Image: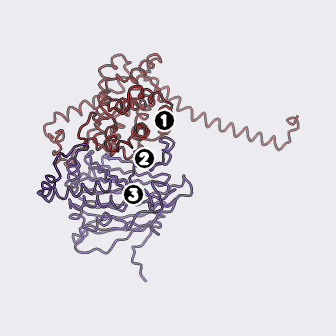
Chain colours: A red, B purple
Amino acid sequence: MSCHNVSPSSIEETENEIAELERRLSVARAKLRPKTENQKTHSEHSQPPTQSAHHYLLLLSDSALPLGSFAFSSGLESYLAHTPRNHASFSAFLPESLSSYASTTLPFVLAAHRDPAAVADLDDALDAAIICTVGRRASVAQGRALVSVWERSFAGSLPEEAVETLRPYVALLRSTVVASSLSPHTPTSTSTSSSCSSSRSDAKDLPPPVSAHLGPVFGAVCRLVGLTLHQTAYVFMLSHVKALVSAAVRASVFGPYQAQKVLGGADVQRMIVTLIEREWSTPVEEAGQTMPMMDLWIGRHELLYSRIFNS
Amino acid sequence: MQSPFPKSNSASGEGRIVAKLLPNGLPGLETVTYKYPLKLISPSPTAEQKSALVFLLSYGGGLVGGDSIQLAVEVSQNARLSVVTQGHTKILKSPSPDVITRQNLSVRVADDAGLCLLPDPVQPFAGSVYEQTQVFTVTASASLCLLDWVTQGRSALGEDWSFVRWKGRNEVWLTGGEAAPAEDRLLLRDTVVLDEGSRDLTGKGLHASMHGHGLFGTLILRGKQMTRLGEFFLSEFSSLPRLGARDFRSAEVREKEDSNKSAEEQWRLSRLHAEKQHGILWSAASIRGCVVVKFGAKTVEGGRLWIGDMLSREGSISELYGDQAMMCVR
């Protein structure tokens, strides 16, 4: 056998190889150490037991979760109005809408799950990045609803540490909402009429510190009820598909069986997985719009003569 | 022979512009430096100029794959600066997708100063890979008008969003200035990523997801000099005709009513007609103290005509920065 007559040079080679492998092993160990320590400190957030995580996974993915998602079509209604009837198709709209939603919002969901205590900063950064009145309205309406669900419904049955993590954020949000609706010296900033902008250039007119956009709130809540990062991303994207499909049914694009066919189809699963992979390590600063037409359609939803959705 | 261009003494692709108010009260330039492949030209100032003017150019009129440009601009207190280009900024093909052509612009605008950046659109050729980051740091009383637009490429050669990747990011940060160097606050971060890789997802090329548009642009307005212009865009947007509304008037009645309209309404009617003809789709939104206008057009020229018409109809830019600031949108 050849292994018995090893030449001296190859012994040296093997020794070198062993030394190199040992070096790499120690480097890899060093990398792992801070990560496991991190995980330990995070699990001191006292994650609920897996059984309870499973329970919340089902609750958060339920379309009966009272976020009012049914009121928004995420540009579908506007797309249908802008596209000639024979060219418009849901199967063309769906991948574009998913790509756009994932590239603009998913990095914020992932970041909030990775560090739920940073939710206020993430919320503010996302508020600066949604360049569309209608889109902002949809995101904030659902985000605020989720904060209410958290506060009124979930918080009571969760460990104190989990509730504590979001407490400063919720308090900041409440004070912002109260200040903007009661503040007597800035009546123009809350007025809903479109001709109220005369004093907007006021130098001290800073944006509110938090707005409660859905993405970061969702990421943080999922983390605190024990969902994994991947589950969170999957539920977030699937909920978007469900909202779109449900809007399509109500806009008479297709019927309920076709809707289930889309939801159950391999295409939707493949798209969600691909998109989660694409955005998995996108830093929030790099998040951006991959489908610029989506911004135009959603922005122009306000121009529809008749509409059944809020976005 | 003495070179007519300012002396160049910075690192490769780096440039710097400092605009300030001259002792005679005119807007002028304190510093203009640049290095290949970047080139800056400033025509000699005239007594009537409302803003200092700088042409942002590249040698040979385009950026070769892998070129990197870093331009720093400073507009000092009370000064006004217009930055324009001469023709489209062409982005040439990259030898491979990991060779990225970059332009980075970092701008600081001081109290009561203003910058007007209305360049020609970026024209990425087939196979190009481009990333552009523009960061604007402004004080509360500073003003900013910036246009960032990109075309489908050389349509005469059949290019239709045929590049590998185009990424443009614009950020507006509010700073307390030197008096109050508190932490800067992000007001706006607008990023557009057009990536050929989306084919895997949609099963169609980039051009399909642009839905027949040959140009896509973003206009960002901020600050007291731009308040009127911003409100103009917002009010024109909200007075666009409703989609799906029907006009039940007969042709004669319509003609009669249209001819009785004021000059403003006449202008609006002809603009709406042009919007239809050039396939202009636009929206305007007020976001955290900035007004952001997004628009798409079937053709580059159609889009240029539209934005030029809107800006010159309202008139703030010509009034505050002079006609020279508008030369790329006419």
Q: Position of residue B308 (x, y in %)?
A: 28, 61
- Please, what secondary structure does the residue beneath circle 3 have? strand
For mark 2, what is the residue? B209
Dot 1 alpha-carbon crowd within 10 angstroms: few under 14, some 14 to 19, many 20 or more:
some
Q: Amino acid at mark 2?
A: Ser
Looking at the image, the residue that sits furthest to the left is: B260
Asked if A67 appears above or below A200 in the picture, the reply is above
Residue in front for this viewpoint, A150 or B33: A150
Image point 34% across, 20% down: which residue? A155
Residue A220, quarter of picture:
top left
Q: Which mark is first along the chain, 3 or 2?
A: 3
Q: Amino acid at mark 3?
A: Leu
Residue B105 marker = 3
Nearer the observer: mark 3 or 1; the answer is 1
Nearer the observer: mark 2 or 1; the answer is 2
Residue in front for this viewpoint, A54 or B35: A54
Q: Is residue B229 left or right of residue A66?
A: left
Disc 2 + disc 3, Cβ < 8 Å = no
Q: Position of residue A214 (x, y in %)?
A: 34, 32
Are marks 2 and 1 in one subunit?
no
The chain containing the residue under callout 2 comes to B
Dot 2 alpha-carbon crowd within 10 angstroms: few under 14, some 14 to 19, many 20 or more:
many
Are marks 2 and 3 in one subunit?
yes
Residue B115 seen in the figure: no
Image point 41% across, 81% down: which residue? B2
* Distance between mark 2 and mark 3 Cα atoms: 28 Å
For mark 1, what is the residue? A271
Asked if A236 appears above or below B299 in the picture, the reply is above
Residue A94 marker = none
Q: Amino acid at mark 1?
A: Met
Image point 34% across, 22% down: which residue? A64
